[in-house]
């Protein structure tokens, strides 16, 4: 039976979160034909015997079973209940069959674990929520997990980070298959950004592993955090404070943090700039100087590389007062 490009199958699981489960239905399910948007045939599929109960205790009765995957051109797994539990074998077999028959298979957030369990991500790059990325990489070492990006397009496989990134991935699919005008129309109706690049960074903290109290690195790391505004603070100065040669310091630092001292110091300065952008009204040049850069010109390329957006864009999104005013 041929696959219909307007048919979208959405798999629903017991004890899955309701919001993530509803994301593809929100994007594809509403009738927007009055705005020249194609009418999608969205099929809510009970991936397990029902009734299903969401993580919030709300019962769902999806009208379709796994056999409905046979005609869907797009098959979306919007979530899964836990990274540690293997999905049911009938679901994995149905996903493999749909993919082999030409369907585009999509895993949003924890849905990536379902695709990985089916073997569909082996040898591929994949995204998931940054908090669960280490678990995905550990459980499925053949998957190249990218913990930073919003979503990854591998052609017939698409994976995304959590919640809002699932909306981004679904809108991207609409744009890829039906054009920017239709995707933008859906985004306007949903009152969400029409396009965020898949390569944009997830907004994540990068916590520092805590050294032992008697470790000389403890004093060095604490000192560095307190003096990030000092543009003269560099790796040689930190190595000297630790009473180590530059080579020994670099090796010990990598063992502790997983990165080079220079990269760690840059990341800490960017994180400090993030907090200043969130909590103060300092201009970009002043933020840059307090984070140890010579000015905004020096800050911007490093900030964009680490965070994925420009400093002003970050402030517009995360400033403490952002989002309270509604403009017509």
Image (tube, rainbow, N blue to C red):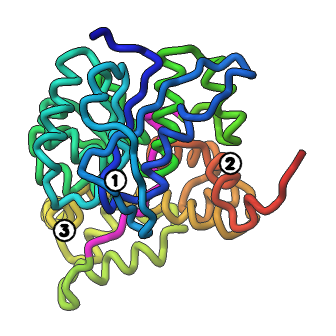
Q: Which residues make up the magenta segment?
A: 197-209
The verdict on residue 6 being magenta is: no
Residue ID at (71%, 34%): 188
Kindly indicate whether the residue at mark 3 contacts the one at mark 1 (C-beta within 8 angstroms). Answer: no
Label 2: which secondary element: helix
In the picture of the structure, the residue carrying the numbered disc 3 is 256
**Along the polypeptide, which appears first: circle 1 or circle 2?**
1
Q: Whole-percent x and y of residue 54? A: 39, 62
Q: Whole-percent x and y of residue 184? A: 66, 26
Taking depth in this image into account, of 148 and 235 the one nearest to the observer is: 148
Residue ID at (25%, 15%): 102
In the picture of the structure, the residue carrying the numbered disc 2 is 312
Q: Is residue 54 above or below residue 177?
A: below
Label 3: which secondary element: helix
- Outermost residue on the bottom side: it is 214
Q: Residues within 10 Å of mark 3 (few under 14, many from 20)?
A: some
Nearer the viewer's eye, disc 1 or disc 2? 2
Residue ID at (42%, 27%): 8
Would you say residue 148 is visible in this rendering?
no
Would you say residue 253 is visible in this rendering?
yes
Q: Which mark is residue 191?
A: none
In the picture of the structure, the residue carrying the numbered disc 1 is 263
Q: Whole-percent x and y of residue 117? A: 14, 43
Give the image quarter of residue 328.
top right
């Amino acid at each position: 039976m041929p696959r219909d490009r307007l048919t979208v199958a959405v798999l629903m699981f017991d004890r899955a979160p309701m919001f993530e489960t509803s994301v593809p239905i929100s994007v594809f399910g509403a009738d927007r034909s009055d705005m020249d948007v194609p009418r999608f045939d969205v099929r809510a599929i009970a991936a397990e015997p029902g009734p299903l109960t969401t993580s919030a205790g709300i019962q769902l009765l999806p009208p379709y079973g796994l056999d409905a995957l046979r005609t869907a051109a797009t098959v979306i797994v919007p979530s899964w209940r836990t990274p540690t539990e293997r999905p049911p074998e009938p679901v994995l077999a149905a996903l493999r069959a749909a993919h082999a028959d030409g369907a585009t298979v999509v895993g949003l957030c924890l849905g990536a674990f379902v695709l990985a369990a089916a073997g569909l991500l082996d040898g591929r790059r994949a995204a998931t929520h940054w908090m669960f990325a280490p678990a995905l990489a550990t459980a499925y070492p053949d998957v190249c997990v990218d913990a930073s990006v919003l979503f990854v397009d591998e052609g017939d496989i698409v994976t995304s980070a959590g919640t809002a990134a699932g909306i981004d991935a679904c809108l991207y699919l609409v744009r890829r298959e039906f054009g920017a005008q239709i995707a933008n129309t859906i985004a306007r109706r949903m009152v969400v950004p029409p396009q965020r690049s898949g390569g944009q960074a997830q907004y994540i903290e990068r916590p520092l592993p805590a050294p032992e109290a008697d470790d000389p690195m403890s004093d060095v790391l604490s000192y560095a955090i307190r003096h990030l505004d000092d543009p003269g603070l560099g790796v040689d100065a930190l190595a000297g404070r630790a009473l180590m040669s530059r080579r020994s310091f670099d090796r010990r630092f990598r063992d502790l943090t997983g990165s080079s001292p220079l990269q760690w110091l840059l990341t800490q300065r960017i994180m400090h700039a993030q907090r200043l952008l969130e909590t103060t009204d300092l201009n970009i040049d002043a933020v840059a100087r307090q984070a140890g850069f010579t000015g905004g010109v020096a800050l911007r390329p490093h900030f964009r590389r680490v965070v994925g957006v420009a400093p002003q864009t970050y402030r517009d999104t995360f400033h403490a007062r952002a989002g309270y005013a509604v403009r017509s």
